[in-house]
């Protein structure tokens, strides 16, 4: 058996009675090991568990036997609506069919156990809640057993739990029947978690609990929020980032049927209407004169030229060993290359939206958000309220991919401004064009490398310079994430690359460009471009050394067992080295991100300049796979997202304006482009990592390495687009 | 006022002639199962059936639907093919964020209503207008094949 865990000190759980009858297990104080947000720890330090209102619970057992699990994180497709309840149900021995799930409200009690604020991101939900949710289940189980012992007049150690019941040799009582008694008992200060060999739910593929409502159209997204008196708002924003309204004429707009009001807000001009269609027509009829500001000459082609010039200069050091310059000067074989990844929009399927209702003593917000704490704080600041006066209702997110976790709280702040200016409850909706043109992109990055190879073909010196915008600068995370001028997310996957660790001389430099294009984390963050550069470069080196790309990686990664395990499993399943159908070639890439290790082998053919990706075989070591089928779904998802970006997607600027607008010119992956995907999970007891993002970084290089194998052409700029035509 | 037949019922709607069916369903009828993704027939999130044919409701004005039958995701459980498609979706655990899935199911149902045994190429042709940013494509494909088998 596992050692008992001291609950009160580690997770601050507390049992109390539910107002409507039943048992509620509430948070008292967030367990925050490290705080990314200065001051986040102070917010709730004085909270007394006994005074907590029931909404701050994360587990409720009703007298009707329903078990409601409150999610401290947001469901955006990644499957935590199922995975987190699995953790509780396992320890509780709950009847899975009685589990219901709700998004928690926004409150300090729901802060991320590692990041200190309420956030869903960094592929961290399952590992960061693995202890807290299991402990909640175990503690609840202990209380229910005590309650049964009291009722039956027997010793607790003669009782066991089974599928929603406490069971003795002769009797069984349902959890619901014990809930009220359990709520009156003292909360245990320590519980023992199950030995993994006794797990019945954890590690078993479990169907999604949100499946049925997402299949019959009843699942509610932010876009679906409707209530009496709620108006629809659409904001006309500057065509150039940072532009301001000089003047506007709303006469034509206001004459349209269904248009109620037109108000100016900090981000532009908002049309308030009875419905989306009227709001859209009202916005189209606005005449606005803009002061476009300094960005009016922005041009991404010119920016790239500037990046190139910068890359020829030193930059700030991000990692360093030996004497790279001297080693390069002496080398007989030097490989030099430049890789470029473009700006990218997240374009979640559900365009952004946010409903706001302001009352005398507070504000209610309905939206799909990944970052409740900053949204709540931003709304409170605008309205002169305390954060706790802002109630956030998190709905299902129609995709997030990072776009709905914005430290600047852009779409929430704007909606609050609109509601404030309009004086009525409004739901601010974005069109797809607004989404594509609205900024907060994955920044464009240029990687330039100069690598010396020794006699044996192995690298002896590696100079690597990156140029791009920082996503952390100016955010509350700046103080933690930017050290000595280097944003860790700009160089992740390079500065900490396992390849560099065994090279005597290396130097990673960073130029952080001060651009005014709003940028943000995009699924897999810095790894989304660094893996493309690193895994392409390794492929270039293998070819320069006339070695097999798999064997070359194996040799370089020989002291990295988790990389190797993923590499070997994928290579074996993909039949690496065995012949393929005529015209089809293989490429391979391996990359660690978010604590997980992923290899992909892509099978690709190129016909008349058209790239066809036939099959991707992938292997992941993420430690324990709590819900293996959900993990597989995330790998399929990451591959689709990353492949679409690699093949088609890019955001460009000309004369200050974004040149793309909708899915016809900001292209993403479609059914016809989706390869067969095979996912293999390394059986692992190593430290848990994430699964929502790590499947993305290897896709682009696996495919472009396969293109090289097929055609001899090295793709060094994304997207692949028509470069092979 | 316009009269529309929605999911088998005649409904009177206060909607201008040029209002797309999507917004008449969502904002006037509060039938929010049909989703908005692009507004220009690029993503398929808004797919409904008009006399059994899959159409993009975001670009089809209500005037076009007069005298015809609109069927939405909300009525799929009463449709033999739609029900089988939904069952296959559940069996294969297709959904992720779920936002595109009403449109996917409507498109798949329209496909299976006219093609009882679609090949992969048929699925590519019929389903490539429906974007899924979560990349549920492999499961959608598998679920369409599974539903076809069940219906055969
Ligand atoms: S919303 Fe109609 S096709 Fe995209
Ligand atoms: S399930 Fe999220 S867009 Fe398809």
Image (tube, coloured by chain):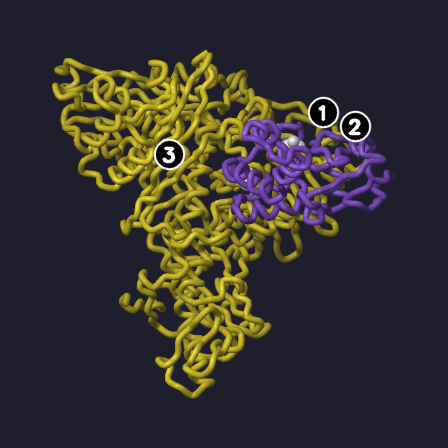
Q: Label 1's element?
A: strand
Residue A260 lies, in percent from the top left, at 77, 39
The quadrant in which residue A503 appears is: top left
Disc nearer the start of the sequence (2/3): 2
Residue A248 lies, in percent from the top left, at 70, 27
Disc nearer the start of the sequence (3/1): 1
Q: Name the residue at 37% across, 45% down.
A: A690
Mark 2 and mark 3: span between their CA atoms?
Answer: 57 Å
Quadrant for ligand 2 reads: top right
Q: Chain of mark 1?
A: A
Report which residue position mark 1 lands on: A287
- Mark 2, residues whose alpha carbon is within 10 Å: few (<14), some, or many (≥20)? few
Q: Label 3's element?
A: strand
Judge from the rendering whether residue A217 lies leftward or rightward of residue A466; answer left or right: right
Rendered colour, chain A = yellow
Residues tagged 2 and 1 counted as in contact (Cβ below 8 A) = yes
Q: Name the residue at 44% across, 58% down.
A: A86
Report which residue position mark 3 lands on: A617
Report which residue position mark 2 lands on: A252
Judge from the rendering whether residue A1 lies leftward or rightward of residue A716; answer left or right: left
Between A326 and A288, the one nearer to me in the picture: A326
Residues tagged 3 and 1 counted as in contact (Cβ below 8 A) = no
Q: Chain of mark 2?
A: A
- Mark 1, residues whose alpha carbon is within 10 Å: few (<14), some, or many (≥20)? some
Can I make out residue A430 in this image?
no
For the N terminus of chain A, the quadrant is bottom left
The label nearer to you, 2 versus 3, is: 3
Q: Chain of mark 3?
A: A
């Amino acid at each position: 058996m596992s050692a008992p865990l001291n609950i009160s000190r580690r997770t601050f759980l507390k049992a109390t009675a539910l107002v409507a009858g039943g048992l509620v297990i509430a948070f008292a104080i967030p367990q925050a090991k490290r705080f990314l947000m200065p001051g986040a720890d102070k917010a709730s330090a004085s909270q007394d568990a006994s005074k907590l209102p029931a909404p701050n619970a994360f587990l409720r057992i009703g007298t009707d036997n329903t078990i409601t699990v409150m999610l401290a994180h947001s469901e955006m497709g990644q499957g935590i609506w199922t995975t987190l309840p699995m953790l509780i149900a396992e320890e509780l021995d709950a009847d899975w069919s009685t589990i219901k799930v709700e998004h928690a409200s926004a409150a300090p009690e729901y802060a991320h156990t590692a990041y200190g604020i309420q956030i869903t991101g960094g592929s961290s939900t399952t590992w960061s809640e693995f202890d807290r949710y299991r402990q909640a289940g175990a503690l609840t189980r202990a209380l229910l057993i005590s309650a049964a012992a009291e009722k039956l007049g027997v010793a607790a150690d003669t009782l066991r739990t089974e599928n929603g019941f406490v069971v003795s040799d002769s009797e069984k009582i349902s959890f619901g029947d014990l809930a009220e008694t359990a709520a009156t008992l003292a909360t245990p200060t320590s519980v023992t978690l199950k030995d993994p060999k006794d797990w019945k739910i954890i590690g078993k593929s479990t169907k999604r609990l949100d499946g049925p409502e997402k299949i019959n159209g009843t699942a509610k997204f932010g876009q679906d929020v409707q209530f009496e008196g709620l108006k629809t708002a659409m904001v006309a924003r500057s065509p150039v980032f940072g532009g301001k309204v000089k003047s506007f004429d709303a006469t034509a707009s206001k004459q349209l049927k269904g248009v109620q009001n037109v108000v100016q807000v900090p981000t532009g001009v908002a049309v308030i209407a009875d419905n989306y269609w009227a709001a859209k027509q009202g916005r189209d009829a606005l005449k606005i004169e803009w002061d476009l500001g300094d960005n009016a000459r922005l041009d991404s082609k010119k920016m790239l030229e500037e990046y190139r010039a910068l890359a020829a200069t030193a930059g700030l050091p991000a990692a360093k060993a030996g004497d790279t310059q001297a080693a390069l000067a002496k080398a007989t074989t030097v490989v030099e290359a430049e890789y470029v990844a473009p700006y990218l929009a997240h374009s979640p399927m559900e365009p952004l939206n946010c409903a706001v209702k302001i009352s005398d003593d507070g504000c209610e917000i309905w939206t799909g958000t990944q970052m409740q704490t900053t949204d709540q704080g931003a709304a409170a600041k605008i309205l002169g309220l305390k954060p706790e006066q802002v109630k956030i209702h998190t709905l299902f997110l129609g995709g997030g991919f990072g776009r709905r976790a914005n430290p600047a709280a852009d779409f929430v702040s704007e909606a609050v401004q609109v509601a404030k200016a309009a004086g009525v409850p409004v739901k601010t909706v974005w069109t797809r064009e607004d989404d594509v043109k609205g900024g907060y992109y994955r920044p464009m990055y240029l990687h330039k490398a100069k690598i010396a190879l020794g006699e044996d073909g192995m690298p002896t010196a590696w100079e690597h310079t990156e140029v791009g915008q920082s996503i952390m600068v100016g955010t509350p995370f700046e103080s933690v994430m930017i050290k000595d001028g280097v944003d860790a997310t700009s160089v992740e996957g390079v500065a900490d690359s396992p390849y560099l660790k065994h090279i005597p001389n290396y130097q990673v430099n960073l130029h952080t460009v001060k651009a005014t294009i709003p940028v943000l984390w995009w699924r897999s963050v810095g790894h989304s471009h660094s893996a493309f550069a690193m895994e392409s470069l390794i492929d270039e080196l293998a070819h320069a050394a006339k070695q097999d790309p798999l064997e070359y990686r194996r040799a370089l990664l020989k002291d990295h067992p988790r990389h190797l395990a993923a590499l070997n499993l994928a290579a074996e399943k993909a039949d690496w080295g065995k012949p393929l159908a005529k015209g089809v070639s293989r490429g391979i890439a391996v990359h660690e991100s978010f604590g997980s290790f992923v290899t992909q082998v892509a099978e690709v053919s190129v016909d008349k300049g058209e790239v066809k990706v036939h099959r991707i075989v992938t292997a992941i070591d993420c430690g324990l796979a709590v819900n293996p089928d959900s993990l597989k779904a995330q790998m399929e998802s990451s591959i689709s997202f990353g492949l679409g970006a690699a093949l088609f997607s890019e955001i460009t600027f000309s004369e200050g304006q974004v040149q793309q607008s909708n899915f016809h010119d900001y292209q993403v992956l479609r059914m016809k482009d989706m390869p067969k995907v095979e996912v293999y999970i390394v059986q692992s007891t190593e430290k848990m990592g994430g699964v929502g993002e790590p499947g993305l970084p290897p896709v682009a290089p696996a495919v472009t390495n396969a293109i090289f194998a097929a055609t001899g052409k090295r793709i060094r700029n994304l997207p692949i687009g028509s470069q092979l035509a | 006022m316009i009269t529309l037949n929605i999911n088998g019922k005649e409904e009177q709607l206060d909607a201008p002639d040029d209002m797309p069916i999507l917004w008449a369903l969502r904002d006037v009828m509060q039938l929010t199962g049909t989703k908005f993704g692009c507004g220009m027939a690029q993503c398929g999130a808004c797919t409904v059936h008009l006399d059994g044919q899959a159409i993009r409701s975001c670009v089809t004005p209500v005037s076009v639907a007069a005298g015809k039958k609109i069927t939405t995701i909300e009525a799929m459980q009463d449709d033999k093919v739609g029900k089988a498609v939904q069952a296959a979706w559940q069996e294969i655990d297709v959904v992720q964020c779920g936002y595109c899935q009403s449109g996917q199911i409507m498109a798949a149902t329209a496909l299976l209503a006219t093609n009882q045994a679609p090949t992969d190429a048929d699925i590519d042709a019929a389903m490539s207008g429906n974007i899924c940013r979560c990349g549920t494509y492999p499961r959608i494909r598998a679920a369409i094949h599974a539903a076809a088998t069940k219906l055969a």
